[in-house]
Each structure stands twice: as C-alpha cells, then as structure tokens.
Image: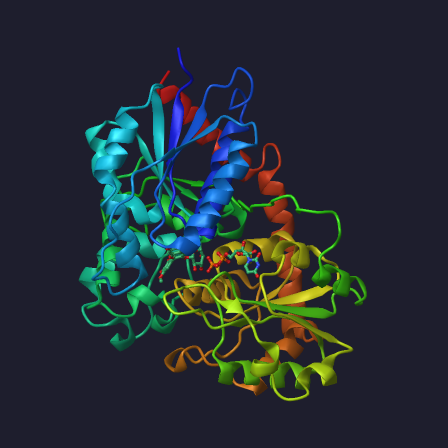
Amino acid sequence: MAIPTVVLIPVWGTGHLMSMLDAGKRLLGCRGGGGAGGRLSLTVLVMQPPRKEYASAVAATVRREEASGLDIRFHHLPAVEPPTDCVGVEEFVSRFVQLHADHVRAAISGLACPVAGLVIDFFCTTLLDVSRELAVPTYVYFTSNAACLALFLRLPALEEEVTVEFEEMDGEVDIPGLPPVPPSSLPKPVMDKKNPNYTWFVYHGRRFMEANGIIVNTVHEIEQSVLAAIADGRVTAPGARAPVIYPVGPVISFTPPSDDSPHECVRWLDAQPPASVVFLCFGSMGSLPPPQVLEVAHGLERSGHRFLWVLRGPPAAGSMHPTDADLDELLPEGFLERTRARGLVWPTWAPQKEILAHAAVGGFVTHGGWNSTLESLWFGVPMVPWPLYAEQHMNAFTLVVAMGVAVAMKVDRKRNNFVEASEVERAVKSLVGGSEEGRKAREKAMEMKAACRKAVEEGGSSDMAVHKLYDELSTQTA
Ligand SMILES: COc1cc(-c2[o+]c3cc(O)cc([O-])c3cc2O[C@@H]2O[C@H](CO)[C@H](O)[C@H](O)[C@H]2O)cc(OC)c1O
Ligand SMILES: O=c1ccn([C@@H]2O[C@H](COP(=O)(O)OP(=O)(O)O)[C@@H](O)[C@H]2O)c(=O)[nH]1
C-alpha cells in the first residue's frame, strides 16, 4: 500500500511557509518517517500567493525542497481572484484562503495515497469544513507563541466578558497562565472590535476548538505556565477544553549559506569584542519612517555603544516589504563618519541568524516577530522589543514581563510606535552597558537558550511532542 501522507496547507509568508515546512520535516525525521521504509510522506498544497513579491520567494522554497531528496510533494492549487474589499491583513488572508475550499477538497480527494491528516496554518480554519466533510483529522499549526495562542482561545469568552473596547475597560486582561495583560499590549487586530480583522481573530479562536490538535512553535519549558493553563482548561470557556497542544519548537529555518565567503556583516562583527554590539533589525516587513530614523541615529550615537543596524527604506507603492535604504537621504548629516569606528548600517536584507550566532552580538533590538525572537533565544541573545505590527505588542509583553529575557523600551503606540532618541539611548545602554536589568535579561536568555536546545534533542520535550504527533498520525491511517 502507498505510504500515507500528511497534507500541509501553509500561507505564503516566509515566517509561515518555511516554519510549517520545517515542522513537517521533523515528522519525516521520526523513526520510520520519510526516509527509506518511511511510514509517512508530506504533501504541500501551495496556494498561488496574492502578490507577485511573495510568488518568487515561494517558488524558490519549493525548488529547494524538491531538490532535498525528502519525501515531500508539492501540489499547486489553481489561482483564485483575491478579494478586493478587505480592510486589513487578517481579513484578507482569511477570505483569500476561504476561496480555495473547492480546490483543497478536489486536491485532497484526488490524492493517490491515504491521507493521515491535515496540518493547516492558523489563518486557514475556514478549511475545517472541508476536512470534516472528508473525515480527515486536522491540526492547526500556530506560527507564534503559546501566549498569543491563549489569547486566541480566550477571545470568544472575552467577547462576553468585556463589552467595551479593550482600551476602555477597567484594569487588565485576564489570560490564565500569564501575568495580567495591559490592554495596550494586545495584538493590533484586537484593538478595534468594529473592525472585520477582529471578527476574524475571534472566528479563528473559536474554530481552533474543532481541531484534533494545535501544533505550536514554542518550547514547553519557556512557556510552561500558559501551556499548563491551556491544558487544564483554564483559558477556554467553562466546560470547553482546548485540543491537545503540541509544543514542537523552536522551529528555526537554517538554510545553508549560498557561498563560502563570510557576509560583510559577519566580517565586520569578527573585528568587534565579545558581546559588545547591539544588533537592530525589524523583520521582513519592518521599516521606520524618516523622522524615526533620525531618533534612532541620535540615540545610537549618544549611547556610545557599538551597533549593527539593518536600516530599510519605506515599501514601494502596493508592496508590504521594505526597499533598500538610501543611507545618505535617511541618516543625519555626518552620522556615518562620526560612528565609523563602532557602527555598521546595513541597507538591505541581512543574514539575521548568522549575526545572532556571532559572539560579538550582545543584544538585539527587534520588532519581536516570533521567528526573530526564537532565533535570538536559540543563541542566548537578550532583547529590547520594539513592536511594530501584528501580534508584536503582545510578544513584547511576554518577553519582558512573563519571560524576563528582554529590557523594556517605551514605545508610543498612539504615535505609530514612536520611540524618542533618549529612550533608544537608555534602552541600548541598559541592554549592553552592564546594567543590572541587562544582566538579568542576559542570564535569562542564556537559560532559555539551554532550554531550547535541550527541547529538540532526542528525548527533549519538543522531540517527544513531535513523536507523539507522529504516532497519532500514523495510527489514524494504520
Ligand atoms: C499572529 O498575528 C498576526 C499575523 C500577521 C501576519 O500576516 C501575514 C500575512 C501574509 O500575507 C504574509 C505573512 O507573512 C504574514 C505574517 C504575519 O505575521 C507574522 O507572523 C510571524 C509568525 O507568526 C511573526 O510572529 C510576526 O510577528 C508576524 O509579523 C498579521 C497580523 O496582523 C496584521 C497578525 O495579527
Ligand atoms: O534582514 C532580515 C530581516 C529578517 N530576516 C528573517 O526574517 C524572519 C522574520 O520573521 P519574524 O517572524 O521575526 O517576523 P515577520 O517578518 O514575519 O514580521 C526571521 O527568520 C529573520 O531571521 C532576515 O534574515 N534578515
């Protein structure tokens, strides 16, 4: 009989597609997985991305994985017409995915091998209707952390409990397993209940309950208390218990470098003392408006510390991604000359993981995307979170208050996440300048590094979670 397959349905963004593929590959790595005599294969249903800028990145990923020799097949779904009347990302992605339901049904029904299960990105819960119809067990893959997942699961009950906007409520938001969450730290889509993006968040939170399990890119030991609260039924409404949670992280995509010569950023770091450099980078969609760039430049200059700053320009019209920065136009007059001996400003995509791995890096000013956060923890680098979009305000709260791996910085959410130069200076000095706060964050980050590495070793918590999932999937089609 043909080997049963696990069908993956990712969304197209790098932090989503790569993360799900790498998690899937861990299933193939289980005893009897995708190697010779394997008991499971992977089939990836690829949606044609709604924007050209994503299409080439997706195509490159597919080419690389097809050449890997692993038992992974890619099935390209027919294109659909993207909705044109959406107000934001959550609504757009959710509705665009929903339009693929018939194609997903046809693709799964047409597979020549038995289907062990379906793994869907968290934006894809509308497809639970298809999997129910086909009687295929379905797991949600949650690319962010357990704290954010707990909020998703708690939202349907919060709908009843908090009838005003969160920012108008008295006190803080109660999410069992987390310290009380200030309403100003909630993810962007939750900040405006009249917005369809909020409605979609609540919708997904409700539908997660129908899944056979939720796979989360986190580590049991680093989010123990919130994971326990979910498992004990304290997060969900009375009488409702969340599906089994599989913390399989950190899932980090390490792609082999394309040539042997070290990147210019790495060569620059080679000449810096250990733990002396603060690294600033704001994710795949992060760029700072020109007045904000000036504040950062002044803050870094006044801090007196070494820095490696990935500075990107504003996105071109119709794009979500930053352009390469024009440094002469963006930076203050004479800044590069004055800081030449201790700073490097890099105007384009940087090899973030290689940089975080470097001994010279002492701290990371990050937008707090979950992939960046896990990469920082993997290398034991303490952070200063500077949330810009999506769930990043919630991540910043988790990193500072719940995990203690980051030094807080005052970010004015009401002024487009503006940070004053003096605050950049203070945060940088605190992070890499030997303050008690910075020392504690570094110590915690090193503890988390050890926990992350242990979790993915044979017999570690994440390794066990992957095996548990593998066993469940393989028995379902046995
Ligand atoms: C988790 O809550 C939100 C996620 C997103 C979001 O949307 C998105 C849409 C795309 O078409 C492509 C993407 O790559 C993408 C990515 C994305 O979130 C990022 O996901 C990472 C892993 O979950 C990470 O945690 C980053 O912080 C996110 O930026 C958008 C959103 O609101 C706008 C969310 O609330
Ligand atoms: O110059 C850059 C910017 C980002 N990244 C990578 O892009 C991903 C960003 O994912 P994250 O979840 O942190 O944020 P998002 O971009 O999805 O908001 C991470 O793997 C980073 O290492 C990188 O390698 N170089």
Q: Is residue 396 above or below residue 10?
A: below
Name of the residue lying farthest toward the bottom: 333
Q: Position of residue 256 (x, y in %)?
A: 64, 43
Residue at left offset 32%, top offset 23%: 111
Q: Does residue 217 appear in this view?
A: no
Name of the residue lying farthest toward the top: 1
Q: Is residue 338 above or below residue 452?
A: below
Quadrant where the C terminus sits is: top left
Q: Position of residue 276 (x, y in %)?
A: 74, 69
Q: Is residue 409 above or below residue 230?
A: below
Q: Nearer the viewer, residue 80 or 478?
A: 80
Quarter residue 315 falls in: bottom left
Residue at left offset 67%, top offset 85%: 335
Question: Exactly how many numbered labels are in the figure?
Answer: 0
Classify the position of ligand 1 by quadrant: top left, top right, bottom left or bottom right: bottom left
Quarter residue 365 falls in: bottom right
| 162 lies left or right of 260 | left
Quarter residue 147 falls in: bottom left
| 393 lies left or right of 323 | left
Q: Does residue 327 appear in this view?
A: yes
Q: Position of residue 429 (x, y in %)?
A: 66, 78
